Image (cartoon, grey):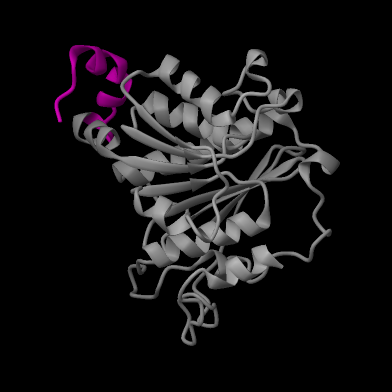
Amino acid sequence: MAFSPEEIERYARHIVLHDVGGPGQQKLKAATVLVIGAGGLGAPVLLYLAAAGVGRLILVEDDVVSLSNLQRQVIHRTQDIDRLKTDSARDAVAALNPHVELVTHPVRIDAGNALDLISQADLVVDGSDNFSTRYLVSDACVLAKKPLVTAALGAFDATITTIRAHESGPDGTPNPTYRCLFPEPPPAGTVPACTEAGVLGALAGVAGSLAALEALRAIVGFGEPLVGRLLMIDARSMRFETLSYGWDPENPLTGEGARITDLSAHKRSAAA
């Protein structure tokens, strides 16, 4: 997969990096990444993956652009209000890097389409804004044996981790799942939504950029991934901390008594 002279110049600062170089840039060009959401987290993820030269991006997002989005969702513009976010994201990616293909699905990811969408990608980045989607996507990635970078935003805090539960660590112990870290979602109503609690706009950019960086590291293959580590960002104190977590033999996906073998539980929960 040869680069054109324009691509060589475009990616010159990657190509001269020892840990990326021409071979790493080729990996980026050959990669397909599924991005869940084009909101506060998904917006910078899409922009930085496109700028980096990831060859094919798949976006799943069913929402339209509203004025209140523009405080943090930097892929959209004022003139995009009331447009599908998939359409405005497509325009932004095309303007930034015409060498990147963006495939859009203006739908909500659910138990019926998750495995099909995830199977089309080499890696998934989840920037969704609700617990039900995070658990669905993380479960589906384990079942599909796909790596997942998952991020979440609070009002002044954010978290990022990588799930590679289809693989084992150096000692042969299975890598942890999302359910090893958070066995169950919090009770309904205990965590206020963004519309109620608010969110610091620039924090979304920081967390989304770090999620994009984690995806790029996974594709190229350098550095130590956030597998079994939760990166926590506190914007009030400007503090970054890392919490280590491991495989739970009682987790329902890959544990000793694994009982989740498909996404039927998510179908029931959506219907309830």
Q: Nearer the viewer, residue 162 or 73?
A: 73
Q: Residue furthest bottom?
A: 257
User: Is 204 placed left or right of 167 in the picture?
Assistant: right
Q: Residue at x 29, y 28 (%)?
A: 17
Residue 7, percent from left and from top: 25, 17
Q: Is residue 19 at least partly visible in the picture?
A: yes
Instruction: Point out the stretch of residues depicted in magenta.
Output: 1-21
- Count of numbered circles on the image: 0
Residue 24, percent from left and from top: 25, 35
Q: Nearer the viewer, residue 135 or 175?
A: 135
User: Is 197 placed left or right of 17 in the picture?
Assistant: right
Q: Is residue 163 at least partly visible in the picture?
A: no
Is residue 245 located in the magenta-colored stretch of the structure?
Answer: no
Q: Nearer the viewer, residue 139 or 82?
A: 82
Q: Residue at x 23, y 17 (%)?
A: 8
Q: Residue at x 77, y 41 (%)?
A: 194
- Name the quarter where the N terminus is drawn: top left
State whether residue 14 is above or below residue 174. above
Q: Nearer the viewer, residue 40 or 91?
A: 91
Q: Residue at x 35, y 69 (%)?
A: 168
State whether residue 245 is above or below residue 195. below
Asked which quadrant contains residue 38, the reply is top right
Residue 164, percent from left and from top: 41, 60
Residue 72, percent from left and from top: 68, 27
Asked which quadrant contains residue 100, the reply is top left
- Name the quarter where the C terminus is drawn: bottom right
State whether residue 134 is above or below residue 220. below
User: Is 213 placed left or right of 251 in the picture?
Assistant: left
